[in-house]
Image (spheres, rainbow, N blue to C red):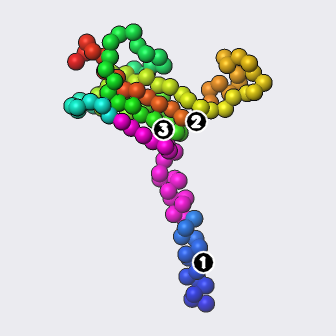
């Protein structure tokens, strides 16, 4: 009788550990960060970091690249702020598309993506 309780306890331990990993582990996966600067810069307030969706026209230096699944442009902005970046260039990659739509701009699934990348930059004239 005591052994059956022990077996039941072990049987519940594995699903409980898996649930804890999912709940407390966050939603981001496939995370990769690469820093290119030799020196470190003080963090900035998140609101000071611009979110861009294309290369800026003014001069800049790439500080770092971030990549993950399950994160947002705001998450990329937060990472960029932590390393003192002026802006982060965000790209959404992958995702779902409607095979019946020929025009990407009219695709009902156009806002879905499976991976996000962010390139943290610092403007040349600010440092």
The label shown at residue 8 is 1
**Residue located 74% across and 18% down the image:** 102
Q: Nearer the viewer, mark 1 or mark 2?
A: 2
**Residue located 45% across and 19% down the image:** 52
Name the quadrant of the C terminus: top left
Residue 23 shown in magenta:
yes
CA–CA distance in space, label 1 to label 2: 38 Å
- The magenta segment: 16-34
Residue 35 can be seen, yes or no: yes
Residue beneath disc 3: 68
- Badge 2 element: loop
CA–CA distance in space, label 1 to label 3: 37 Å
Name the quadrant of the N terminus: bottom right
- CB within 8 Å, label 3 to label 2: no
**Residue located 60% across and 78% down the image:** 8
Residue beneath disc 2: 114
Q: Is residue 37 left or right of residue 70?
A: left
Q: Is residue 113 left or right of residue 68?
A: right
- Badge 3 element: strand
């Amino acid at each position: 009788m005591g052994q059956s309780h022990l077996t039941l306890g072990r049987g519940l331990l594995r699903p409980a550990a898996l649930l804890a990993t999912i709940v407390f582990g966050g939603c981001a996966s496939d995370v990769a960060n690469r820093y290119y600067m030799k020196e470190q810069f003080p963090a900035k307030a998140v609101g000071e970091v611009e979110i861009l969706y294309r290369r800026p026209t003014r001069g800049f230096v790439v500080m770092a690249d971030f990549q993950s699944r399950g994160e947002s442009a705001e998450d990329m902005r937060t990472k960029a702020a932590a390393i003192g970046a002026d802006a982060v260039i965000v790209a959404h990659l992958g995702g779902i598309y409607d095979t019946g739509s020929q025009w990407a701009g009219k695709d009902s699934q156009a806002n879905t993506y499976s991976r996000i990348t962010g390139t943290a930059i610092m403007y040349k004239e600010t440092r």
